[in-house]
Image (cartoon, rainbow, N blue to C red):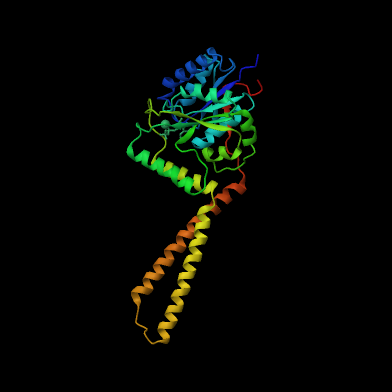
Amino acid sequence: MKKLPILYIVIPCYNEEAVLPVTAPMFSDKLNRLVDLGMISGDSRILFVNDGSSDTTWDIICQLAKEDEHFLGISQSRNRGHQNAVLAGLMEAKDRCDITISIDCDGQDDINAMDEMLRQYREGFEVVYGVRGSRDTDTFFKRFTAESFYKLLNAMGVEVVFNHADYRLISSRVLQEFADFQEVNLFLRGMIPLVGFPSTTVYYSRHERLAGESHYPISKMLALALDGITSLSIRPIRLVLVLGFLFAFVSLAGIVWAIVQSIRGFVVPGWASTTCIICFFGGIQLLSLGIIGEYIGKIYLEVKHRPRYIISERTYDIDQ
Ligand code: UDP
Ligand code: MG
């Protein structure tokens, strides 16, 4: 008989003391049910990644790990953000299991979609993206900004699965290859498709948070959107180049026009037009510099090659 695959469910947690006691039993019930159904091995685990929480989240994780061997925890040395926390968990899990599923800890993503993900894995898919079928529970604003974000990313040439966040199954084989993607500017949902291997999608509906509050305010969402574009696409810089050519051509025509006018003796004191032109080109130049600066900033961060996560504590012995 074929050996059952070991699954690690990777769950980032940042200041989640309100929701963790509610969702942790849900995750362990799910895991046990999947084991009972013969879909995964009994050695499967739930791996919490504490992302430098300032509340009692880590204590709760340690307690859970003490009471039930299915729970494991690692703690980042400080808050590094959701993407780094997920990466830390995936890299930790990749040598200990056959499959990982990453999911948020607030119960918003439907855990029952895991069955279908595992079925797809059995069919031979190495990456299974969880896609939100409907966004009924999101506010209009969140829905609108999120959907525009996916469209913008695609327009900029970044390959992302529409309406997929970070709820996905990845096989450890894919993670082994992904470990070679050494960039520090992380945008996992745009990076995973670059690894290749057969992939598919599974639809699920997204619920409201079960407790606590979102840690993704609009400022963090915007930062993620900007990171997504500038980490994975150089199309904005091309756009700047095209704009540069376009305006260079227009200004050449303007110069010719001005010379002709002055030769014909039609020169008028054109304060307004001069000011407009200065403002216009000043604006375009600043915008272009800003875009280029954003990329130079990224290069600056990449060349330093700092660690992308630092694990300070574990609820288990790493050599086991
Ligand atoms: N999270 C994290 N580090 C952070 C912010 C969030 O690990 O700096 C985790 C958080 O605990 C949750 C997931 O990322 O499990 C998604 O965050 P949240 O639910 O606050 O975002 P939303 O669903 O509102 O976009
Ligand atoms: Mg959430």
In the image shown, does 272 or 17 lie closer to the viewer? 272
User: Residue shown at 64%/32% (left/top)?
Assistant: 176
Q: Which percent across, then down, holds residue 199?
A: 56, 33
Say which quadrant the N terminus sits in: top right
Viewer-proximal residue among 77 and 86: 86
Task: Note whether residue 188 is visible.
Answer: yes
Query: Quarter for ligand 1?
Result: top left
Q: Is residue 295 above or below residue 224?
A: below
Residue drawn at the location 33% of the way across and 74% of the way down: 272
Q: Is residue 177 left or right of residue 199?
A: right
Image location (x, y in percent) of residue 166: 49, 33
* In-front residue for pair 21/139: 139
Q: In the rendered image of this protein, does residue 172 appear above or below residue 252? A: above
From this viewpoint, is residue 292 visible? no
Q: Is 233 or 45 nearer to us in this picture?
A: 233
Residue 185, placed above or below residue 277: above
> Which residue is pictured at 56% across the width and 37% down the height?
192
Quarter occupied by the C terminus: top right
Say which residue appears at 62% left-offset and 24% top-offset: 98
